[in-house]
Amino acid sequence: MMAQGQARAGDVKVDERRRRAAARFGMWVFLATELMLFGPLFLGYVYARTHFPAAFAAASRHTDFWLGTINTGVLLTSSMAMALALAAHERAGPSAARTAARWLVLAALLGIAFLVIKGTEYGHDWQHHWFPGPRFRFAPRYAGGAELFYFLYFALTGLHALHLTIGVLISLGFALGLRLAAAPMRPPVRLELLGLYWHFVDLIWIFLYPILYLVGRSSAGG
């Protein structure tokens, strides 16, 4: 009987490992499809920048360097909070779930702070008529290329903000579930998948920050 019980326990562990591996693989596939949403925009940026280098440099210098830099720090800190939530959840003990929930809430709050700062930057862009369309205003010699830059700027950052909003909502939902649960979340892989998604969103911003805020400032002229 004892041997049978040990065998069943071993089968359960094997099944759990298989489920976790399958879930991770599914998440990586999902993230690959999400990357395909950003891919054409990144390629469009590369193509347009090679054709309008001066206009892109001039438009990039009009982005708010300090708000972009602050937001980068905010998002990197949120990634640390998410990693600490995962680490806390892996630990055994009655306080593991609540500790993980607190880190999740912090990550979500930092995500909200990022969105608020980004919204402030959008308002600044709108006031200066840098939103693509009939009211777009820029130096005449750069206007065409600059409008294309801002089209890509709003498309890329808007799509990123949408993904971050989803991550914030899921994080708050998981945090609430952990606070109400008597034991850590089961299966724990769900929180791990959230961490993968959150780090993916942060990684996208790591690519957006230099191409939208830094490249133009390294160029002379304009």
Image (tube, rainbow, N blue to C red):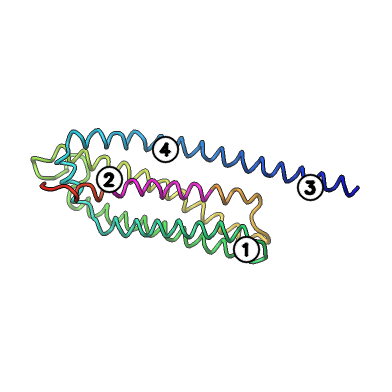
Q: Is residue 202 above or below residue 66?
A: above
Crowding at mark 2 (Cα within 10 Å: few <14, some 14-19, many 20+): some
Residue under numbered circle 1: 96
Crowding at mark 1 (Cα within 10 Å: few <14, some 14-19, many 20+): many
Percent position (x, y) of residue 174? 56, 55
Residue under numbered circle 4: 35
Mark 1 vs mark 3, foreground winner is 3
Magenta portion: prevailing SS class: helix
Mark 3 vs mark 4, foreground winner is 3
For the point 42% across and 50% down, the residue is 164
State the CA–CA distance, disc 2 to disc 4: 17 Å
Residue under numbered circle 3: 9
Residue type pointed to by label 4: Leu
Percent position (x, y) of residue 135? 16, 43
User: Of the numbered discs in the image, which one, if any, rests on residue 211?
Assistant: 2
For the point 28% across and 48% down, the residue is 210
Q: What secondary structure is found at the residue carrying circle 4?
A: helix
Q: Marks 3 and 2: in contact by CB < 8 Å? A: no
Q: What secondary structure is found at the residue carrying circle 1?
A: helix
Residue type pointed to by label 1: Ala
Q: Marks 1 and 4: in contact by CB < 8 Å? A: no
Q: Marks 1 and 2: in contact by CB < 8 Å? A: no
Q: What secondary structure is found at the residue carrying circle 3?
A: helix
Q: Earlier in the sequence, mark 1 or mark 3?
A: 3
